[in-house]
Amino acid sequence: MNAQAKGRVVLKGIRKTFGSFVALDDIDLEIEPEEFFALLGPSGSGKTTTLRMIAGLDTPDAGVLEVDGVDMTFAPPGERDIAMVFQNYALYPHMTVRDNIAFPLKMDRVEKSRIQPQVVQAAERVRIEHLLHRRPGQLSGGQQQRVALARAIVRQPKLFLLDEPLSNLDAQLRLETRVELKQLQRNLNVTAIYVTHDQEEAMTLADRMAVFLDGRIMQVGTPDEIFNRPQTISVAAFIGSPPMNLLPATLDGRSVTLEGHSIELRSAPPCPPGRVTVGVRPSHLRVDTGGIPARLYLTENLGESRLLNLLIGEKLIKMRLTEPGDFADGDTVPVLFDAESIHLFDAESGLRIDND
Ligand SMILES: Nc1ncnc2c1ncn2[C@@H]1O[C@H](COP(=O)(O)OP(=O)(O)OP(=O)(O)O)[C@@H](O)[C@H]1O
Ligand SMILES: [Mg+2]
């Protein structure tokens, strides 16, 4: 990033309603130039609506959108210097790949002699230069997706908006294209805003991300911050595959009591005794003779690991096991909650209790 870097996007108090339905409520975001920023959230949480607002395809009911310090809230899309890639690519079926990629340049009335070199360069960047003469119907899904990318980057916009661009690809191609997309964004030095409901995609691609739930932003941070320090129970319950185990407990000084068993923390969290929710990732649980007895009721074999579904009292928890271990469904397994790796949340407010 440098002082002249372009593509800083700021949203302040953005609100969007459809009839009486509030799709976005008080959205604040600051996206830095050249950042790869992901909007992550479940279906219907408001990601596409936010992106359409930034693209100018929709306008908010309240709030301000600024790009590089200029108020763009009501600017028409053509004035925003953005390119958008949609989930369904939206290529023109009757045009060749060459003409599809050239289209934005023609709309911009770029001089004819400059169009072809730019088209070839964009095609080379996404490795489809050998397909320029074909029509979209003669391409695979992955190739069509590259054409959509080439068409988006050919104008060298300062903002690159992507709405689930990989979701039509098969699992293998999605993984490959993910890496290429990140490389492409780095080489282009543009700001990318990337919508996905796939947390692995968000975690691997994004420099930072915003977690959306029900039209609100629950947390903004780096993938590490979001994964390692979820600020609310709702984020904790969404991130991770499977997500954290969340169990009701009581806290008193350094002691957390969970289904009648107590766990000693290293130090007392800065809060009064009371009801809390304990969070622990499946991979942070261990089998240890000092652990809490749990009944194994189902083992899921995932190849590289096993997921043990266990019952502590009435509560179901999941433990990821990478080491061998001879457990049969129905066995009682001692499960150790490592005090170092548990997360605490206030049971009333749902907010994280920081303890360090
Ligand atoms: N034009 C519209 N009219 C009415 N409701 C709408 C309209 N567009 C979106 N919504 C509603 O707003 C909410 C947010 O929609 P949005 O498309 O932003 O979700 P999303 O997070 O992109 O979800 P997905 O992952 O399924 O694409 C949804 O409940 C949706 O039904
Ligand atoms: Mg969407």
Image (cartoon, grey):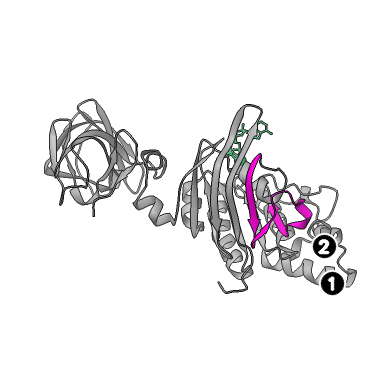
Of callouts 1 and 2, the N-terminal one = 2
**Picture quadrant where residue 26 is located:** top right
Q: 10 Å neighbourhood of mark 1: few (<14), some, or many (≥20)?
A: few
Horizontal relation, residue 81 to residue 184: left or right: right
Residue 232 screen position, x and y as percent = 37, 42
Residue 65 screen position, x and y as percent = 64, 52
Locate the C terminus by quadrant.
Answer: bottom left
User: Which residue, given by chain and number where applicable, does mark 2 sit on?
Assistant: 105
The residue segment tinted magenta is 61-84
- Local secondary structure at mark 1: helix
- Local secondary structure at mark 2: helix
Residue at 66 percent of width and 28 percent of height: 19
Q: Nearer the viewer, residue 56 or 306?
A: 56
User: Which residue, given by chain and number where applicable, does mark 1 sit on?
Assistant: 114
Q: Are the residues tagged 1 and 2 within 8 Å (C-beta)?
A: yes
Residue at 71 percent of width and 57 percent of height: 82
Residue 333 screen position, x and y as percent = 16, 36
Horizontal relation, residue 151 to residue 238: left or right: right
Judged from the image, the quadrant occupied by ligand 2 is top right
